[in-house]
Image: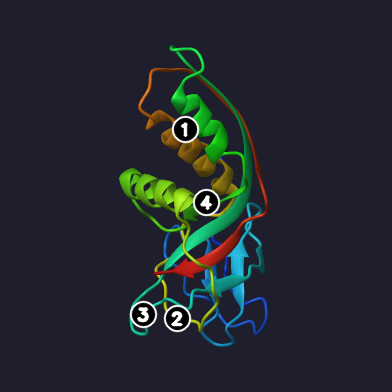
């Protein structure tokens, strides 16, 4: 039996003012007091730190990203035994990497393009002033699955005949950044 739809009033956890929420939004910045908060799986509001990049344009809208440092232990085998791509993969994943996961509604192609590019060449994370941003529609609970998908995308893009890929991913708790 399915649960009935439940309307949850969203009031700021600091000042109590109502939060205007669009469909599918999961995190907000209170327009009255500036407190940042996120919706939990249990439909409660909890504090959620939002950081803003110093590189945001003054009058534009930033894009929210979950950023989590990840350590990947990979086993990769191609049909040509231990090939160049297998060695490149071991080298690439030998150090922790920041995963940038879009926290906003975007297509799969955009998520893959940004996520794989920033795995290789991450943007500098320097805090700046608060600015407007597009709605946050993906929660921190989505980060693990998206990060795993990015690992597979990076490995599938290598120029070889991959036979098998196995990996373990350990992610630090993600932080929310508003980036250009």
Query: Quadrant of the rendered structure where residue 1 is?
Result: top right
Mark 3 secondary-structure assignment = loop
Disc nearer the start of the sequence (3/2)? 3
In the rendering, which numbered label is found on residue 131?
A: 2
User: Do the numbered discs 4 and 1 sit on residues whose CB atoms are within 8 Å?
Assistant: no
Mark 4 secondary-structure assignment = loop
In the rendering, which numbered label is found on residue 57?
A: 3
Q: Nearer the viewer, mark 4 or mark 1?
A: 1
Residue that appears at 58% across and 43% down: 144
Mark 2 secondary-structure assignment = loop
Residue pointed to by mark 4:
5
Instruction: Please name whichever residue, 124 or 112, is drawn nearer the observer in this view of the structure.
Output: 124
- The quarter in which the C terminus is drawn is bottom left
- Counting every numbered tag in the picture gives 4
Residue pointed to by mark 1:
152
Mark 1 closeness class: few <14, some 14–19, many ≥20 residues within 10 Å: some
Residue that appears at 38% across and 22% down: 160
Disc nearer the start of the sequence (3/1)? 3
User: Do the numbered discs 2 and 4 sit on residues whose CB atoms are within 8 Å?
Assistant: no
């Amino acid at each position: 039996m399915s649960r009935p739809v439940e309307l949850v009033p969203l009031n700021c956890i600091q000042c109590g003012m109502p939060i205007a929420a669009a469909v599918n939004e999961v995190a907000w910045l209170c327009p009255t007091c500036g407190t940042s908060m996120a919706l939990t799986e249990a439909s409660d509001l909890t504090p959620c730190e939002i950081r803003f990049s110093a590189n945001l344009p003054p009058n534009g809208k930033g894009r929210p990203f979950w950023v989590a440092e990840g350590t990947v232990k990979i086993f990769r085998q191609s049909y040509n035994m231990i090939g160049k791509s297998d060695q490149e993969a071991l080298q690439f994943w030998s150090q922790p990497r920041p995963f940038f996961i879009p926290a906003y509604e975007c297509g799969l192609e955009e998520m893959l393009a940004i996520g794989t590019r920033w795995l290789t060449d991450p943007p500098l994370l320097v805090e700046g002033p608060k600015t407007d941003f597009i709605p946050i529609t993906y929660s921190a609970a989505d980060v693990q699955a998206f990060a795993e998908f990015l690992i597979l995308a990076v490995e599938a893009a290598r120029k070889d005949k991959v036979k098998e890929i196995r990996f373990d991913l350990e992610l630090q708790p993600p932080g929310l950044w508003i980036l250009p």
